[in-house]
Amino acid sequence: MCDRAGRMHTCPLTSVCAPTQHSAIFCGGRSASVRNSGNTAMTATIAFALGFLASLLANYFLPPFRSAMDGGVAWLCHLLNPGRFDLTGKWRQTFREPTNSDPSQWEDIEETVTLRHLGNRVTGRGETQDNHRVFRYSCRVQHDLVFGTYVKKGERGNTTGSGMVQLVVTPDRLQMHGYATWFDHDTERIESSKVVWKRS
C-alpha cells in the first residue's frame, strides 16, 4: 500500500503497489467480498422463509378455503335452481368383473364412493371392499343422466386402468343405474358390467 507521500509499503492483499485511490480498491476487496457473502446468505434465508410460508399456505389454509368456496358455489346453484338434485355424499356401488384366478368366472364387487356435485360436474373417489382398489371419477350431469370417465390408481398414485360410466338417476335421487365399460387386462378385452349406485 502507498502512503500519501508516495512511499511503497506491502499491501496485505496484493504485492503490487498502485496509487492511493487504487490501493484502497484492492485492499477493500475483502470487505466487498464479505458484504456479498452476507447478501447471498440473507437472500437464501428469505427464499427459504418464503418457501416455508408458501408450503403452509398451500397445505393448511387453501384446502379449507377451497372447500368453503365450493360449498358456497353449490349453495348458490341450489338457490338459483332449487329443483336441481344434489349427488354430493357417500354412495355404495355394486358391479361385476372377471376374477383374477379364472377370467371366465365373474364375481360381485362392492365399492364405497364419495361424490362431490358442483354445478354440472361430479367428481369423486371410490375404494373397493375386497382389495382396496382406488378409483377417481370425473363426470358430468345432464338432466337425469350422469356420464363420464374413471381411472384406477395404483399404490404409488399412478394410473393403472381407466373406463367409462353412464348412469340414470332415479326419481327419488337415492339410486343410480347404468353401465360401466373398461379394458380388462385379465381377459385382454373390453368388458362391460351393469352397475347400481345406492346412497349410504
Image (cartoon, rainbow, N blue to C red):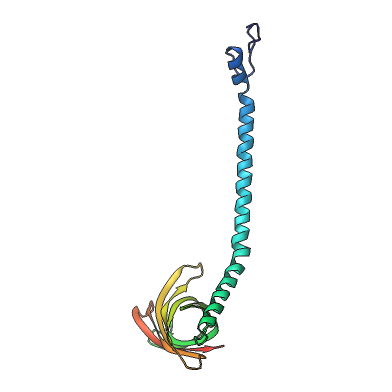
Q: Residue 132 appears at what percent x and percent y?
A: 53, 78
Residue placed most toward the observer, 165 or 143 = 143
Q: In the image, what residue occupies the spot 57% across and 75% down? A: 71
- Residue 73's place in the image compared with 19, above or below, is below
- Residue 37's place in the image compared with 127, above or below, is above
- Residue 36's place in the image compared with 160, above or below, is above
Q: Residue 33 appears at what percent x and percent y?
A: 61, 29
> Does any portion of residue 128 appear in the rendered image?
no
Q: Residue 138 appears at what percent x and percent y?
A: 45, 75
Residue placed most toward the observer, 130 or 83 = 83
Furthest-left residue in this view: 189
> Does any portion of residue 149 appear in the rendered image?
yes
Q: Tag count in the figure?
A: 0
Q: Residue 169 appears at what percent x and percent y?
A: 46, 89
Q: In the image, what residue occupies the spot 60% across and 33% down? A: 36
Residue placed most toward the observer, 190 or 165 = 165
The C terminus sits in image quarter: bottom right
Q: In the image, what residue occupies the spot 64% across and 31% down? A: 34
Find residue 24 and report its image quarter.
top right
The N terminus sits in image quarter: top right
Left of 122 or right of it: where is 1? Answer: right
- Residue 200's place in the image compared with 46, above or below, is below
Left of 155 or right of it: where is 106? Answer: left
